[in-house]
Image (cartoon, rainbow, N blue to C red):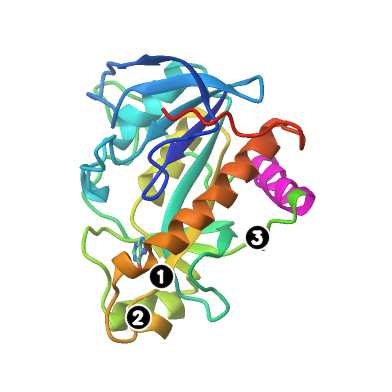
Amino acid sequence: MLAIIGGSGLTTLSNLDVSHREVARTPYGEPSGALVFGQICGQPAMFLPRHGYGHSIPPHMVNYRANLWALHHHQATGIISVASVGGIRGDLDPGDIVVPDQIIDYTWGRHSTFFDGVGSPVTHVDFTEPYDADLRQRIIKAGEELGVAIKVGGVYAATQGPRLETAAEVNRLERDGADVVGMTGMPEAVLARELGIPYAAINVVANHAAGRGHSSNGIHFESLEPVLQEAMGRVRSLIERLVGCQDACRPLGMSV
Ligand code: HPA
């Protein structure tokens, strides 16, 4: 079953025909919220809002291990991670959709492995390609079929947050080769890898990164909210399409 982790701007999945919710308990504590199960165009899917239903869990406090463990426990066969980002690369504007292909991790102090329990074998997972190639292709193909523009490829820089970056930090991220910056992509991606769940990301550019473009004098999310909401509508269409919806299958209008 496909799982969708929603971030800022996607706290509900209106095209999910909900069958039930489940509050999961895990060896790592509680996930961000109840898992919501249902169908998208007849295909089973589950949804989890990364920041909780009240959008109250900041990026560094998300219980990533509990979230991933719960999805695994409920037989997630793939995870689409939706997250808003700041655009660093010059061609990225608010509202753009990016499917990144690489990650640089600048986070610290987060529980970033399942392999640290007593007696747990020392395990080094391969993470050369952090995102699943097939799942990425399904997103890209859905975009082509729908005529939804996608910027294919990009390096995602995962910062600690919850504060935004300084302009100098963004310059450094660019020198490092980063194209977008967000606060939640890690350790989510590596925990999925440790569990063997294919994982890919859809990033929505919410703002120019600090010191760039519209953000040269600061970042004001409020003014960008309508852009983010419109873009999330396109993300919902992409998700519908990649699970197999055809044109006749429209959103069911149900909110989780
Ligand atoms: N920086 C980090 N995370 C973000 C940003 C940003 O500019 N925009 C949305 N998430």
In the image, taking residue 51 as reference, residue 103 lies left or right, namely right
Instruction: Mark 2 and ligand 1: say if the CB distance to the nearest ligand atom is below 8 Å.
Output: yes
Q: Name the residue under label 3.
A: 150
Q: Mark 1 points at which residue?
A: 207
Residue stretch rendered in magenta on the structure: 132-145
Q: Main secondary structure of the magenta part?
A: helix
Residue shown at 66% from the left, 25% from the top? 41
In the image, taking residue 78 as reference, residue 87 lies left or right, namely left
- Label 2 packing within 10 angstroms: few (<14), some (14-19), many (20+): some
- Disc 3 or 1, which lies upstream in sequence? 3
Q: How far apart are marks 2 and 1 (CA)?
A: 7 Å
Q: Quadrant of the N terminus?
A: top right
Instruction: Residue 144: say if magenta.
Output: yes
Q: Mark 2 points at which residue?
A: 215
Determine the quadrant in which ligand 1 lies: bottom left
Query: Is residue 176 in sight in this rendering?
Result: yes
Instruction: Mark 1 and ligand 1: say if the CB distance to the nearest ligand atom is below 8 Å.
Output: yes
